[in-house]
């Protein structure tokens, strides 16, 4: 199997076959991220992808899930994604789900017919780094989309029948802005049906633009207490239309919350209140 650079995948894909279809990230501008900072973006050839799939048959013949690498494989054209899906279905016929990261702009680049055809070929469970529904924060972290654009594209995924995991990063708006950020993010999440809402805690990583902004005093990090209150406010304002898994298994989190909303809403709030009372 060919892997050109460091491998990043969601915690929930720990036992899933990883297939490289791109290297790096097509956007690579988010100020909090250093994962692909020194990796030149490129796409993998269909010949190499098929070679890897033939190799994978020897140890993953009965696998039902595959995860495409790297930062935003859904940026590939619909035609190339269709070709990749057909190769997967050819060599790993037991595979039911082809998952990957996607950005909002990559969804926007596909027509509804293309989205539906990709879904029919097994592409599903897109991991989307939404991060926040606050437009000021989205602009500051150079995410490349507005909250309204995110809502529109998530609704299109719902219409196409493509499930998605909404990744939310609390603390991203900075000191003093957590409650506003939580309310805006809840509004976004209430507007479309996520399969999973996955929380991450903003971590300032040396070498990133956001870290440098913090050193210059241009970005003030939220305290742990502020972040707990932000997460609580987010959950209080979530009014989801469907049963939605809620996960904070990522190692960055300061409050482990795993369950289903709206069923576990009060349990989560009680747990957060108990943590807040420790400060």
Image (cartoon, grey):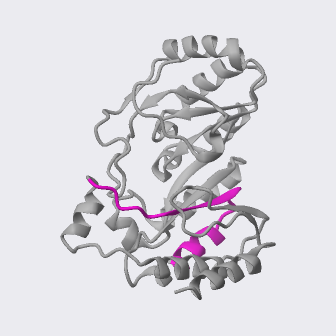
* Residue under the point 33% across and 59% down: 142
Residue 183 falls within the magenta-colored stretch? yes
Residue 186 falls within the magenta-colored stretch? yes
- Vertical comparison of 180 with 33: above or below: below
Q: Position of residue 227 (x, y in %)?
A: 49, 76
Instruction: State which quadrant residue 15 falls in.
Output: top right
The number of numbered discs placed on residues in the rendered structure image is: 0
The answer to which of 217 and 141 lies nearer the viewer is 217
Left/right placement of residue 146 relative to residue 233 reads left
Q: Position of residue 247 (x, y in %)?
A: 66, 60
Instruction: State which quadrant residue 275 falls in.
Output: bottom right
* Residue under the point 48% across and 19% down: 2
Q: Which residues are magenta?
A: 182-206
* Residue under the point 75% across and 81% down: 266
The answer to which of 58 and 251 lies nearer the viewer is 251
- Vertical comparison of 256 with 224: above or below: above
Q: Position of residue 255 (x, y in %)?
A: 59, 70
Q: Which residue lies most toward the front here? A: 278
* Residue under the point 65% across and 77% down: 235
Q: Position of residue 155 (x, y in %)?
A: 63, 59
- Vertical comparison of 107 with 1: above or below: below
The answer to which of 229 and 234 lies nearer the viewer is 229
- Vertical comparison of 221 with 159: above or below: below
Left/right placement of residue 242 relative to residue 133 reads right
């Amino acid at each position: 199997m060919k892997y050109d650079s460091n491998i990043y995948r969601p915690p929930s894909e720990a036992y899933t076959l990883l297939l490289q279809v791109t290297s790096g990230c097509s956007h690579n501008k988010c100020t909090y991220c250093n994962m692909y900072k020194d990796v030149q973006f490129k796409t993998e050839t269909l010949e190499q992808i098929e070679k890897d799939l033939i190799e994978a048959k020897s140890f993953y013949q009965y696998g039902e899930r595959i995860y495409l690498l790297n930062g935003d494989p859904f940026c590939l054209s619909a035609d190339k994604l269709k070709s990749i899906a057909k190769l997967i279905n050819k060599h790993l016929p037991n595979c039911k789900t082809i998952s990957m990261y996607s950005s909002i702009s990559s969804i926007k680049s596909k027509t509804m017919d293309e989205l539906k055809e990709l879904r029919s070929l097994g592409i599903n469970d897109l991991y989307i780094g939404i991060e926040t529904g606050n437009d000021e924060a989205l602009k500051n972290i150079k995410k490349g989309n507005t909250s309204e654009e995110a809502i529109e594209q998530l609704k299109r995924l719902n219409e196409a029948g493509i499930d998605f995991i909404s990744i939310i990063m609390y603390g991203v708006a900075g000191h003093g802005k957590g409650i506003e950020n939580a309310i805006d993010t809840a509004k976004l999440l209430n507007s479309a049906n996520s399969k999973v809402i996955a929380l991450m805690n903003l971590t300032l990583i040396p070498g990133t633009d956001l870290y440098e902004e913090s050193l210059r005093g241009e970005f003030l990090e939220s305290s742990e207490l502020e972040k707990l209150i932000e997460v609580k406010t987010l959950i209080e304002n979530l009014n989801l239309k469907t049963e939605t898994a809620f996960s904070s298994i990522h190692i960055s989190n300061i409050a482990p919350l795993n369950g289903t909303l709206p069923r576990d809403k009060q349990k989560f709030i009680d747990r957060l209140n108990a943590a807040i009372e420790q400060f």
